[in-house]
């Protein structure tokens, strides 16, 4: 039971994504834990890329939001901390996604698209 409580606390903390929520609100994107919200994020103009530090923070938030959507929508998905402290999204199949690395790649390079990662995770 303690592990379940810890995972739930991690999920609540990771779901906050303050910088991403500010960006989404300013762009009239509603973050409602759906694949549609991920698609809307994928379609934003990446003005944040001019500032590497903002891009990294935003990418971390985007990855945590992606993981939050997967956790809430894909049966059996859960958070787990890697040995080095990175949050990993573990799918019901046991496959692990480094959500924050995916989010940083999205913020810095535009790929992979968040909605595509979600769709791949939900197909597993």
Image (spheres, helix red, strand yellow):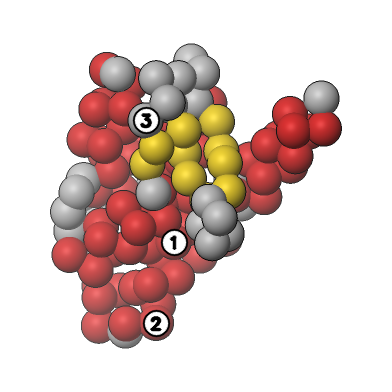
Say which quadrant the N terminus sits in: top right
**Within 10 Å of the Cα at label 1, are there few (<14), some (14-19), or many (20+) other Cα atoms?**
many
Q: Earlier in the sequence, mark 2 or mark 3?
A: 2
Q: Which residue is pictured at 17% across the width and 65% down the height?
A: 109
| Quadrant hosting residue 116 | top left
Q: Earlier in the sequence, mark 1 or mark 3?
A: 1
Give the alpha-carbon distance from disc 2 to disc 1, as whole Å: 11 Å
Q: Establish if 69 lies above or below 55.
A: above
Instruction: Name the element at disc 3.
Output: loop
Can you give x and y, in whole percent of width and height, for residue 18 in the image? Answer: 57, 60
| Quadrant hosting residue 56 | bottom left
Give the alpha-carbon distance from disc 1 to disc 3, as whole Å: 20 Å
Horizontal arrangement in the rendering, residue 111 relative to residue 78 (left or right): left
Q: Which residue is pictured at 32% across the width and 84% down the height?
A: 51
- Mark 2 or 3, which is nearer the eye? 3
Q: Earlier in the sequence, mark 2 or mark 1?
A: 2
Q: Establish if 99 lies above or below 89.
A: below
């Amino acid at each position: 039971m303690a592990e379940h409580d810890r995972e739930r606390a991690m999920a609540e903390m990771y779901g906050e994504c303050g910088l991403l929520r500010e960006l989404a609100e300013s762009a009239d994107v509603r973050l409602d834990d759906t694949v549609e919200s991920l698609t809307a994020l994928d379609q934003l103009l990446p003005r944040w890329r001019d500032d590497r530090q903002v891009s990294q923070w935003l990418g971390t938030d985007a990855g945590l939001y992606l993981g939050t959507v997967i956790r809430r929508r894909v049966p059996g998905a859960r958070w787990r901390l890697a040995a080095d402290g990175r949050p990993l999204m573990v799918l019901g199949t046991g496959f692990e996604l480094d959500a924050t690395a995916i989010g940083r790649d999205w913020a810095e390079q535009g790929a992979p698209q968040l909605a595509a990662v979600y769709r791949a995770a939900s197909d597993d």
